[in-house]
């Protein structure tokens, strides 16, 4: 049987499998990270870290149902020093993406400077889209974003990507892309959870999570169409050497295929990884290979970004 190539490159970073965890999904503690390191994922992304340890919001702060999930975690993490020290002691066999999410711009400079000192990190995923913190870094002020990135790339030497929130207007994607295209960015990850959803417990007539009056970021199957649309739009506006990591609503090999068809070079699994555990990577790999075999594709490069528009035959 012909071999099917499901490896990928995020710019210059080689992944033997184009599937990894999404930041936030069982990647906070040493036990969780060890589990991911041992798994068959193509890379490991850490929980977004801050300068200091954070307990996060009150529980319940995560809830899932058949078609999705809602969270308002409040950035619980062990602080950047923990992640750097943890990685220092590991034999690393696949790319490591350190996710950073400073509570202010200054804190992001500090975190990126520290991450630059670690040899174990392949890339930094700068999370500019945490819906559960107060200061909005990726707001509407495009000058501010450009200024911020200008300062980062004055000192940053590591491959750096940006985790983006979902956008709902073509113009917003175009405006952000014009800025990103001016900087030596390695990748974007899109999308983070859809902010400010509510899930209702009909029996009790309550929200299902406690923080933020029950409002939280929505993930899982229900957000896939928004993830695909964002990937597609960014693919049309971004410089070709900026890779896209797709994230949002993947629970089957077919979902992985759709993300790649829209323009992603690799994908991340959040809600489904929390539901299923690290065996999800093997299952998705098998389902993706089966689908590519059916479609007669020998590599993800055969169809990446090649979504066609509906035509009447
Ligand atoms: C959290 C949620 C996010 O969607 C994110 O990008 C970072 C942090 C959180 O609440 O912990």
Image: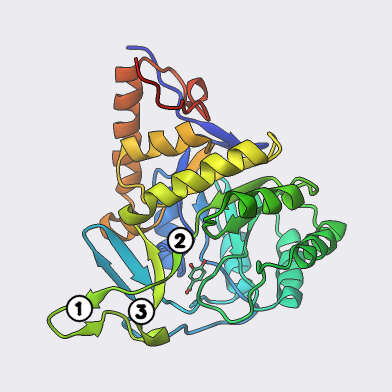
Q: Local crowd at mark 2 within 10 Å, few (<14), some, or many (≥20)? A: many
**Residue 255 placement, left or right of 49:** left
**Residue 126 placement, left or right of 246:** right
Q: Earlier in the sequence, mark 2 or mark 3?
A: 2
Q: Which residue is mark 2?
A: 33
Q: Whole-Å distance between the Cαs marked 2 and 3?
A: 21 Å
CB-based contact (under 8 Å), mark 3 and mark 1 = no
Q: Which residue is mark 3?
A: 61
Task: Measuring from the top left, give residue 67's x and y in whole percent.
Answer: 25, 57
Q: Is mark 1 within 8 Å of ligand 1?
A: no
Q: Residue at x 32, y 12 (%)?
A: 1
Q: Secondary structure at mark 3?
A: loop
Task: Measuring from the top left, give residue 159's x and y in whole percent.
Answer: 71, 49
Q: Residue at x 45, y 70 (%)?
A: 29
Q: Say which of marks 1 and 2 sits in front.
A: 1
Q: Quadrant of the C terminus?
A: top left
Q: Whole-Å distance between the Cαs marked 1 and 2?
A: 33 Å
Tally the numbered discs: 3
Extreme residue in the top direction: 1
Q: Residue at x 38, y 49 (%)?
A: 224
Q: Is residue 50 above or below residue 230?
A: below
**Which residue is nearer to you in this view: 81 or 127?**
127
Q: Which residue is mark 1?
A: 201
Task: Measuring from the top left, give residue 304's x and y in whole percent.
Answer: 51, 28
Q: Earlier in the sequence, mark 3 or mark 1?
A: 3
Q: Is mark 3 within 8 Å of ligand 1?
A: yes
Q: Residue at x 75, y 72 (%)?
A: 110
Image colouring: rainbow
Quarter of the image for residue 143 reads bottom right
């Amino acid at each position: 049987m012909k071999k099917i190539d499901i490896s990928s490159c995020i710019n210059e970073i080689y992944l033997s499998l184009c599937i990894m965890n999404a930041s936030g999904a069982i990647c906070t503690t040493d036990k969780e990270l060890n589990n991911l390191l041992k798994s068959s994922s193509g890379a490991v992304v850490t929980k977004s870290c801050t300068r200091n340890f954070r307990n996060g919001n009150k529980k319940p702060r995560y809830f899932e149902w058949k078609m999705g999930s809602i969270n308002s975690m409040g950035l619980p993490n062990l602080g950047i020093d923990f992640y750097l020290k943890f990685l220092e002691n590991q034999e690393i066999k696949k790319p490591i993406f350190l996710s950073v999410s400073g509570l202010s711009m200054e804190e992001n400079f500090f975190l990126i400077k520290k991450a630059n000192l670690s040899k174990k990190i392949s890339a930094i995923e700068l999370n500019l889209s945490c819906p559960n913190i107060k200061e909005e870094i990726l707001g509407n002020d495009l000058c501010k974003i450009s200024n911020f990135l200008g300062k980062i790339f004055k000192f940053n030497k590591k491959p750096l990507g940006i985790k983006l929130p979902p956008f709902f207007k073509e113009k917003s994607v175009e405006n952000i892309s014009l800025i990103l295209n001016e900087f030596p960015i390695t990748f974007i990850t899109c999308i983070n959870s859809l902010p400010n959803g509510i899930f209702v417990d009909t029996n009790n007539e309550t929200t299902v999570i406690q923080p933020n009056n029950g409002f939280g970021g929505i993930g899982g199957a229900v957000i896939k169409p928004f993830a695909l649309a964002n990937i597609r739009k960014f693919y049309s506006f971004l410089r070709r050497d900026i890779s896209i990591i797709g994230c949002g609503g993947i629970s089957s090999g077919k979902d992985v295929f759709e993300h790649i068809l829209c323009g992603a070079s690799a994908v991340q699994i959040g809600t489904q990884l929390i539901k299923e555990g690290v065996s999800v990577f093997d299952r998705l790999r098998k389902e993706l290979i089966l689908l590519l075999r059916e479609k007669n594709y020998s590599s993800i490069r055969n169809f990446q970004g090649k979504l066609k528009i509906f035509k009447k035959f």
